[in-house]
Image (cartoon, rainbow, N blue to C red):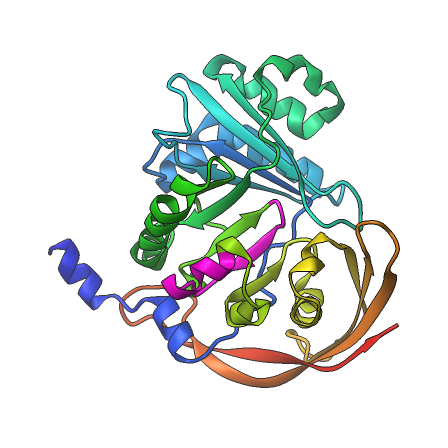
Amino acid sequence: MTTEKLLGDCQFCSVVSKANGEDPIGTAITADIWLMMEIPLPWTKEKLFNDPLIKHIQNLCRELQHKNIRVIPMAIAPDKEYSEPGYTRVMRYHRSSKSFAEFDKQEFIVPQSQLFGLISVLLQQPDEIHQFESYQQANKQSRELMVCTHGNIDAACARFGFPIYQKLRQDYAASSNGNLRVWRCSHFGGHQFAPTCLDLPTGQFWGHIEPEMLDTLVHRDSAVTALRKFYRGWSGLTKFEQIVEREIWMKHGWDWLNYNKSGQVLAQDTANKDADWAEVRIDFTSPDGSIQGNYQGRVEVSGSVVSALNSGKEQPLQTVKQYCVSQLKRN
């Protein structure tokens, strides 16, 4: 059977999700550390789960999880313009405090022989990173868009993610004078929202991306409300906090990205596995510290949609709760 025939029989989860109006908000992965490493394609399950270095990273991530530090590892595909033969790029993005605006970045390009040691230091002994100072890169200010094209996990990511990656890479990154880099990356959840990407250093997630919204996404010179339906949430917050944060961002506009933020769930429904409501507080401080305050919001179920969580022939559909912010008050 040809690839075309297989695709013709495939029910793409993101097509079902988008057609049924599933709101992607609240689905961003909450992380303390993002760890990106160049790994040549293809990213088969056998390659990603049996490689000794990747197993080592997974073990270190589990150890940190026990300390309530969530590390999300991610593969990025080497790029003929960005990458150096014989060397591997590693990027570590981490939150510097509970309240923050952007993830802090460290980037290294190391020989293969140094890779194991670098990863160990980055995750176990970050204060000893001076050992790798000669390999550290200076481009801390560059913006990175990580577009999931990982078709080995879900076909929708390759089918819809790759064209968006190409457009971002060719039409935007190529003319950015190095201020924007676009990468093909491995799966980070939410393939029903393909094409989906992670925006760093802000840590914002995007889903159901359309070519028409890319100018606003990249240039940030139009109203943020145009991005509302594509926003999966901010990686610095949890599910219900992300839902409230979107409403606040819609009010404040682009300046909101520069504010230090933190969130907490004050109370939530415990009667249902998927809570029907939650009370959330978002604290914020302006970059110069002159503006401080908090928002308190109530998140409630507003309805439900039917969605597919995976692509494939005759995949079962599931009912997914949809939420809205019914109350929002600034203090």
| Residue 292 position within the rendered picture, expressed as x and y whole percent measured from the top left | 87, 60
| Residue 97 position within the rendered picture, expressed as x and y whole percent measured from the top left | 80, 44
Q: Is residue 139 above or below residue 157?
A: above
Q: Residue at x 53, y 36 (%)?
A: 36
| Residue 5 position within the rendered picture, expressed as x and y whole percent measured from the top left | 14, 61
- Whether residue 2 sits left or right of residue 168 in the image: it is left
* Front residue of this view, candidates 127 and 328: 328
> Any magenta on residue 316?
no
Q: Is residue 292 above or below residue 52?
A: below
Residue 269 in view here:
no
Q: Which residue is situated farthest in the bottom direction here? A: 303
* Front residue of this view, candidates 112 and 137: 137
Instruction: Write the start and end of the magenta stretch as one range.
Output: 201-217
Q: Is residue 327 above or below residue 245?
A: below
- Whether residue 64 sits left or right of residue 310 in the image: it is right
Q: Residue at x 33, y 58 (%)?
A: 160
Q: Quadrant of residue 316?
A: bottom left
- Looking at the figure, which quarter contains the N terminus? bottom left
> Any magenta on residue 205?
yes
| Residue 221 position within the rendered picture, expressed as x and y whole percent measured from the top left | 55, 60
Q: Which residue is situated farthest in the left direction here? A: 1
- Whether residue 155 sits left or right of residue 172 in the image: it is left
Q: How many numbered marks, from 0 up?
A: 0
